Image (cartoon, helix red, strand yellow):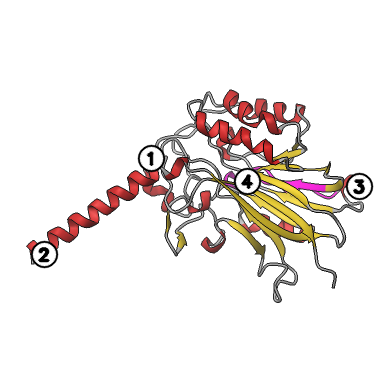
């Protein structure tokens, strides 16, 4: 029996090693631009192009990623939404600002993720497969300059939505915004409605780093037309033709990335009444201590919001 088993074990080990090599050397740097269409605008309105960035996890040495992000400005989006985890290194702030600089002339809004506040730490990579991965901080993490990053983005005109409401004009539209600080570290407090953001708007957007179901429920009940989130890395390690194994939060794995409806079917489907649109970005990076992706390319997404069909 043993002579028959050994070749199979060897073949399995070789396949595993090849998969790790692919994920660590190729796919983790194989950046993709996704494009989706969302029928959410009032009937008769022209399209609105929204660039969704998330989970850059930048370090100063990632020159190719920096250049790739900078080139996204050639898409000429009407609005940029950044759902956090921009910094992946204690010295990452200049790299993040360099990467985002060509986009800072475009209207934008952002929230922070835990890796904008705290530098990544070495840990057992198998912990990522736990549903509470990243929530138990055993050692005191090194703080990152989140306040300086926020100040630079706000100075450029982007809206800070960490437990805040705001409004913005983009593509000739008036847009109401609401966001929360990172739910993964329980920093989220959905702000109460105020007079400035309760008037008539063309669009209402909700923004969060981690798509915990409590936040999605709150934003859907608050009247968001589209909710933006990141954090999941799309599962980071996925199985071909099956998908993500984890989301690193309580969102189901079937919605680990991409455009979906919340809480049920998509609003454009027959049984989607009462749902809102939700886009979860698989993000562009990983922790420097787990620099592998498999069957889940790093990505940014250009969402073209178009008019709903007249009923």
Of tags 2 and 3, the one toward the viewer is 2
**Image quadrant where one finds the N terminus:** bottom left
Q: Is residue 101 at all visible to an observer of this figure? A: yes
Is residue 185 highlighted in magenta? yes
* In front of the other: 180 or 69: 69
**Residue to which mark 1 is pinned:** 25
Residue 103, position as x, y percentages in the image: 70, 34
**Residue to which mark 4 is pinned:** 209
Residue sitting at the far bottom: 270
**Residue to which mark 3 is pinned:** 195
Q: CA distance from mark 2 to mark 3?
A: 74 Å
Question: Do labels 1 and 2 touch, CB within 8 Å?
Answer: no
- Residue 221 vertical position relative to residue 183 in the rendered view, above or below: below
- Residue 278 vertical position relative to residue 192 in the rendered view, above or below: below
- Residue 59 vertical position relative to residue 230 in the rendered view, above or below: above
Tag 1 secondary structure: helix
First of labels 3, 1 by sequence position: 1
Of tags 3 and 1, the one toward the viewer is 1
Q: Provide the residue span drawn in magenta.
A: 176-193
Tag 3 secondary structure: helix
Tag 2 secondary structure: helix
**Residue to which mark 2 is pinned:** 4
């Amino acid at each position: 029996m043993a002579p028959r088993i050994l070749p199979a074990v060897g073949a399995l080990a070789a396949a595993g090693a090849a998969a790790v090599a692919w994920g660590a050397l190729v796919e983790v740097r194989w950046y993709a631009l996704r494009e989706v269409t969302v029928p959410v605008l009032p009937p008769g309105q022209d399209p609105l192009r929204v660039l969704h960035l998330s989970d850059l996890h930048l370090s100063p040495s990632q020159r190719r990623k920096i250049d790739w992000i900078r080139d996204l400005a050639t898409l000429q989006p009407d609005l940029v939404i950044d759902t956090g985890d921009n910094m992946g290194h204690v010295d990452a702030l200049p790299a993040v600002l360099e990467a985002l600089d060509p986009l800072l002339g475009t209207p934008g809004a952002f929230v922070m993720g835990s890796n904008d506040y705290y530098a990544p730490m070495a840990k057992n990579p198998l912990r990522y497969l736990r549903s509470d991965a990243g929530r138990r901080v055993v050692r005191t993490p090194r703080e990152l300059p989140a306040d300086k990053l926020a100040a630079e983005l706000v100075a450029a005109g982007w809206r800070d939505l960490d437990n805040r409401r705001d409004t913005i004009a983009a593509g000739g539209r008036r847009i109401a915004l609401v966001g929360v600080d990172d739910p993964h570290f329980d920093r989220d407090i959905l702000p109460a409605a105020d007079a400035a953001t309760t008037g008539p708007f063309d669009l209402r957007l909700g923004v969060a780093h981690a798509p915990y179901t409590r936040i999605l429920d709150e934003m859907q009940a608050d009247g968001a037309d589209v909710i933006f989130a990141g954090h999941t890395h799309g599962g980071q390690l996925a199985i071909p033709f099956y998908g993500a194994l984890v989301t690193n939060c309580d969102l189901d794995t079937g919605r680990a990335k991409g455009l979906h409806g919340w809480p049920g079917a998509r609003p454009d489907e027959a049984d989607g009444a009462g749902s809102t649109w939700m886009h979860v970005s698989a993000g562009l990076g990983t922790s420097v201590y787990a620099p592998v992706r498999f069957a889940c390319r790093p990505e940014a997404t250009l969402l073209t919001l178009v008019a709903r069909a007249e009923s």
